[in-house]
């Protein structure tokens, strides 16, 4: 409002404001009619100011109306453009979400397939590890049975060395299978964790896809829209698009890495199962070969001992007859010796000069000496024969004991150990099938 517009005067005694003139008082008689009155010039100035102000306000209103129409048209165009751009970006976002969701689905399917294959190998490893208890029991039983050998057959032969190698190999195989099984269990856990991460990311993207699809269907004619004043505020937890892309890429890269690790571990498990089964089977064949060779050696030794025993028994019979013959021969020399000694005894009773060393005397002395020497030789021969018979008896006992030892060893190796080894698992069983 113009500064020339006058305010009403309510206080007649108030001092006049600067720039305003008040008519002078003519005295106390006219004070009630002339006090606080404007001049005509002031009235005209006030009227002109009011007109000017109304004109200015009208022009300003027209200017604002034109600007409002222009702004309304501009805002409408901007709103439509922004809404169209937002709808277009939502469509592009839906395509990105669908693409990422498809990649996550493929990653989840691949991880599920890898995990299933690895679970199959885990079951094979467990079965193979359980199967190794049978060869270990067979080998330890063979060693325990062969400890019951006695005598000279209780020897650390090649069979025992191969059995000890077999036990050590089985324990090493069990340790390797346990280690590989632990790796498989750990890899299955990592696969499941990566799969869970992908599934969570897929679930989030699926929910985001549904929300964006729902948002994309909104238009100006939608009746289910309403005001959310706080929705336009930027939240601190919002991430940028680069972080969004990187998050999924990191998850997919981790899933790919776990798939590659799982495939490598599957190859390792297959190789471990195959090689351990082949090693165990090869060692089993080596033990069986040593058993066959040892049984052949025992059979040959037993046959030789039995042949020697038959010869010793035959010789014992011959020696016993020889001893009987020597005893009879010595007994047969008793009569001639008595005759000769009796002749010498009675001829020693000859009287005086008749007791001479004549030819009969010399012959009798020679006869007694010869018969006594013969008896001594026969007794010496009899003693040697009896010593030989005792040695033959010792040999017989030794041979019979050794034959019994060989028979017992053959029974352990051939009838117990080798028969028990027929239950040795096959290569397929050792491979976990």
Image (spheres, rainbow, N blue to C red):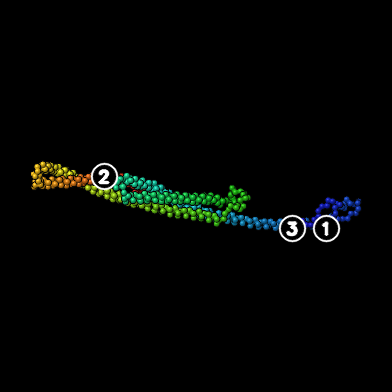
**Residue 56 shows which numbered tag?**
3
Q: Which residue is mark 1?
A: 19
Q: In which quarter of the view is residue 145 placed?
A: top left
| Residue 54 drawn above or below residue 402 | below
Which residue does the image show at 48% across and 53% down from the upper left? 255
Secondary structure found at label 3: helix
Task: Looking at the image, tell me whether mark 3 or mark 1 is earlier in sequence order.
Answer: 1
Mark 1 Cα-neighbour bin, 10 Å: few <14, some 14–19, many ≥20: few
Task: Looking at the image, tell me whether mark 2 or mark 3 is earlier in sequence order.
Answer: 3
Secondary structure found at label 1: loop
Secondary structure found at label 2: helix
Which residue does the image show at 46% across and 50% down from the upper left? 186
Residue 290 image offset from top left, x and y in percent? 30, 51
Mark 2 Cα-neighbour bin, 10 Å: few <14, some 14–19, many ≥20: few
Is residue 107 visible from the viewing direction of this image?
A: yes
Q: Is residue 428 left or right of residue 46?
A: left
Q: Nearer the viewer, residue 90 or 265?
A: 265
Q: Is residue 374 left or right of residue 48?
A: left
**Residue 401 shows which numbered tag?**
2
Residue 327 image offset from top left, x and y in percent? 16, 43
Q: Identify the image quadrant of the N terminus.
A: bottom right
Task: Looking at the image, tell me whether mark 1 or mark 2 is earlier in sequence order.
Answer: 1
Q: Nearer the viewer, residue 257 or 59?
A: 257
């Amino acid at each position: 409002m113009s500064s020339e517009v006058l305010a009403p005067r309510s206080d007649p005694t108030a001092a006049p404001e600067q720039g305003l003139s008040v008519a002078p008082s003519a005295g106390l008689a006219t004070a009630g009619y002339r006090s606080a009155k404007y001049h005509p010039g002031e009235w005209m100035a006030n009227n002109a100011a009011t007109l000017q102000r109304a004109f200015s306000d009208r022009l300003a209103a027209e200017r604002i109306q034109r600007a409002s129409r222009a702004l309304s048209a501009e805002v409408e165009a901007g709103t439509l453009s922004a809404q169209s751009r937002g709808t277009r970006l939502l469509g592009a976002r839906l395509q990105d979400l669908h693409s990422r969701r498809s990649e996550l689905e493929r990653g989840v399917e691949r991880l599920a397939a890898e995990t299933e294959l690895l679970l199959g190998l885990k079951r094979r490893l467990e079965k193979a590890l359980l199967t190794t208890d049978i060869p270990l029991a067979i080998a330890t039983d063979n060693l325990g049975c062969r400890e019951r050998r006695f005598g000279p057959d209780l020897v650390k032969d090649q069979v025992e060395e191969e059995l000890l190698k077999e036990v050590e190999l089985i324990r090493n195989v069990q340790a390797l299978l346990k280690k590989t099984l632990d790796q498989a269990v750990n890899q299955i856990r990592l696969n499941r964790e990566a799969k869970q991460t992908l599934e969570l990311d897929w679930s989030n993207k699926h929910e985001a896809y549904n929300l964006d699809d729902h948002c994309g269907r909104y238009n100006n004619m939608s009746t289910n829209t309403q005001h959310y004043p706080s929705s336009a505020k930027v939240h601190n937890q919002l991430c940028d698009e680069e972080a969004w892309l990187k998050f999924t890429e990191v998850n997919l890269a981790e899933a790919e890495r776990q798939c590659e690790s799982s495939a490598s571990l599957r190859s390792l498990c297959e190789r471990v199962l195959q090689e351990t089964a082949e090693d165990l089977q090869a060692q089993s064949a080596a033990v069986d070969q040593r058993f066959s060779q040892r049984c052949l050696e025992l059979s040959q030794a037993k046959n030789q001992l039995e042949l020697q025993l038959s010869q010793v028994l035959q010789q014992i019979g011959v020696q016993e007859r020889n001893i009987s013959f020597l005893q009879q021969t010595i007994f047969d020399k008793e009569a001639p010796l008595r005759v000769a000694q009796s002749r010498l005894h009675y001829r020693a009773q000859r009287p005086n000069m008749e007791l001479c060393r004549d030819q009969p005397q010399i012959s009798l002395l020679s006869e007694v000496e010869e018969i006594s020497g013969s008896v001594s030789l026969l007794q010496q021969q009899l003693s040697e024969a009896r010593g030989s018979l005792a040695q033959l008896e010792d040999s017989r006992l030794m041979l019979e004991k050794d034959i019994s030892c060989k028979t017992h060893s053959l029974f352990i190796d051939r009838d117990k150990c080798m028969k028990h080894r027929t239950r040795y698992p096959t290569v397929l069983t050792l491979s976990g099938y």
